[in-house]
Amino acid sequence: MAAAANHAADAPPSPPPRNLAPLAWGFLAVTLIGVALWLGTRNVDGRMGAPVPIDESQPATQQPWRLAVDGIVIGPQPASAAKKPVFKDAEERVIDIYQALRAGDRKTALSLAEALASDLPNFQLGRLLYADLLATSINKPVDLKSLAATSAEGKKNLQALLEESRLRLQALTEVPAAGSLPDNLLALPDSTRHVIAVDTSRSRLYWLVNKAKPGQPLDLVLEKDLYISVGRNGVEKQVEGDGRTPLGVYSITSKLNDDALPDLYGRGALPLNYPNALDILRGKTGSGIWLHGTPSEQYVRAPLASDGCVVLSNPDIASIFGEPGIVGTSVVISPELKWVKREALADLAKPFKTVFDGWMNHRMTADFAGLRNTYSDDFFRKGKKLSYWWPTIKNETAPTIKISDLSIVRWKDKDEVVVVNFAEQLKPRARIERKRQYWRLERGEWKIFYEGNA
């Protein structure tokens, strides 16, 4: 509960006022439908699959709808429909509504919206979309000036819902191509169970799962693509209380069940190891960064709403919370993930892997001069510098060192860093230890600036 107290500022904003002018809802509908039509044919960075055509086997519907705002007419277009997300959830139900609108089937769209609002009354976007469709069904032009009568708080919440919808729709056409992985994942052991990658610019969490059978090579695939919220002031956390979500490579350190937490954190929390070694080297402060759920009165949070945590809907946090081996899972939080073909990762890893193999060779041959050259002058561990730890490092050499479960995850911003995890056995029948290193590219050479037990 002490940890939970650190998250008091994570309290959700008040729900949007119920007395917003009906004409304001029409503005939302026009905006969202326009976004839906625009995204139906969008393609970004070559990462997205081809649009899926509308199913022409569906029965014919009423005449296409038309909406006019300040002389701009918006209506259905013959463009193909966007690809649906893999899992049936609240987000896909929103997408089904837009698909019906694209096909000109306003009646079905309204029916779907009504069911969504009824089934998930705490899903604010669903309620708002239903109100939109009711308002626009009268086919009256929308006076955007009517928004001036809306309270400042109402406008803020309305804008947050617009942004949430934009991001959800954007995710339809920005599904990573089949067989691709984030380029941060240079090398992972066959024993990997899953990896989490967060793209904060898209408010998405990608759940990657190893589909290989025991004894087979790693087969990491994207299984879930989930909407998330981040810090109210954005990302790149620097100090305690700045309301920002940290960026970097982290790991899940523990599980906090919902019965041990206030309602604010929903159906469970997964703490991360912030600040990590790179954060500490850079002087960043703060703590208590979690992946967690949503309070019961809300289905999801606005895109920028937390005090720094990554927040999911309760069904989504529950879907990963109970996964075997979730503690220790790597979590990459990036302002923008870059997806590459998995075959390309081995080539990306080669330059560093050569350096890592050299470090191993120095240890196995007791080449202390070469070994020292692989450590940074900025090395630290538990507040002590390299001079303190050098005798220990020298003693951890042997001609029989065995390394297994090697993981290499890259991070690149103003520095290029790799986080390395591995299991090590110095001598036959000796105890196997789990270790973690942080390497940084310094003047063209890779150097270790942190090393310790994982």
Image (tube, rainbow, N blue to C red):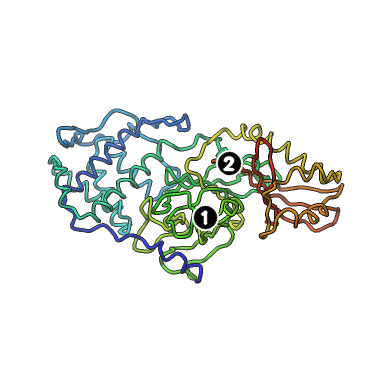
Q: Nearer the viewer, residue 200 or 438?
A: 438
Identify the image quadrant of residue 356.
top right
Q: Please tell me whether residue 324 is drawn above or below residue 92 in the rendered image.
A: below
Q: Could you tell me how far apart the alpha carbons at marks 1 and 2 are, in whole angstroms? A: 31 Å
Q: Nearer the viewer, residue 1 or 318?
A: 1
Label 2: how many Cα within 10 Å (few below 14, some 14–19, many 20+): few
Q: Position of residue 264 (x, y in %)?
A: 41, 65
Q: Identify the residue at image location x=75%, y=57%.
A: 388
Q: Which residue is mark 2?
A: 415
Q: Which mark is residue 8?
A: none
Q: Please tell me whether residue 99 is drawn above or below residue 114 in the rendered image.
A: above
Q: Secondary structure at mark 2?
A: loop
Q: Nearer the viewer, residue 132 or 245?
A: 245
Would you say 309 lies left or right of 181 here?
A: left
> Which amino acid, mark 2?
Asp
Q: Identify the residue at image location x=73%, y=38%.
A: 355
